[in-house]
Amino acid sequence: KYHYTITTAAMPLSPPLYPSLTIVAVLANAASGQHQLMEGQVITLCDRLDPQHIPQECICSEPEHLHAMILCVKPFNGTIFNDTIGMKLDLDVCNSLGSSITLDVTERNHGIEFPIETIHAGDENNIPIPGLSMIVPYVGSFGMDVTVVIAGTPDELDLKVGLNACLKVRSRDICVSDMPGLSSEFPWYILNGKYSFGDVCDGGDSVVNVD
């Protein structure tokens, strides 16, 4: 693992895969208004992902049929980690091999771009982000990981996607999220729960009318 001295800088994400925080805020407000207008009329894939519990740094959209995309720009301003991470999550609910997730991760200060190949239902992974770590005083260097858990079927899909920082000691992982005083920032989850997409894969329609 590598350790970088991280400083705060007002600069865009590189590469520019993600909108600025200002644009995210504007789009999030617009999406909130749209959700209120649609309430009682239709249920979309983004609605089924419980948008009230998606982090405020993220927005959900449906650029492709039966795909939900969540776009996040998350600033971390802690004493041991001061950086901005961008994440783009594409959830393919009705994939013929089982519901699947693909991810793209970027990091601001050093221009890291890290695509993660498709992960299908039944998989559970802690995926290290190459070249990104943080030093915890008196403990050691913790590598930044992308946590991905996807299990079940579209009727009842378990999803856990986010960031954590872990250190391997012998055969055991010790994570910042387990350490008193440091667990307030990590883990940081985009999705964490059970989600139901009903019969959208049978009917082929992600928008369902509500009576």
Image (cartoon, helix red, strand yellow):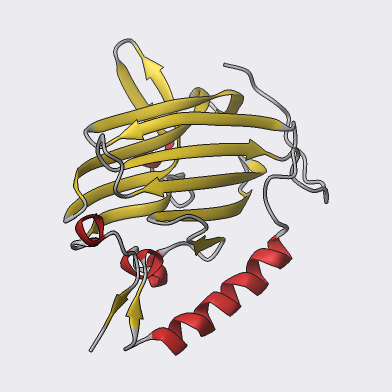
Q: Position of residue 14 (x, y in %)?
A: 76, 39
The reply, left or right, for residue 136 in relation to residue 177 is right
**Residue 42, relative to residue 106: is it above or below?**
below
Report x, y in % for residue 172.
29, 18
The residue sitting at the right extreme is 10
Left or right, 27 with respect to 206, comes to right
Residue 116 can be seen in this image: yes
Above or below 22: residue 133:
above
Which residue extends farthest top? 170
Mark yes or no: residue 181 visible: no
Residue found at x 45% / y 81%: 35
Q: Nearer the viewer, residue 63 or 145?
A: 63
Q: Position of residue 121 (x, y in %)?
A: 25, 37
Q: How many marks?
A: 0
- In this rendered view, identify the residue nearer to me: 144 or 49: 49
Q: Quadrant of residue 28?
A: bottom right
Q: Give 117 or 73, whichever is nearer the viewer.
A: 117
Quadrant where the C terminus is found in the figure: bottom left
Name the one closer to the observer, 86 or 64.
64
Residue 201 located left or right of residue 175: left
Residue found 56% across the figure and 61% down from its top: 57
Residue located at (44% from left, 87% from top) = 36
Kindly identify the residue that appears in the image at 28 percent across and 31 percent down. 124
Residue 71, horizontal then vertical, whole percent: 55, 54
Rendered-image quadrant of the N terminus: top right
Position of residue 116 relative to residue 131, above or below, is below
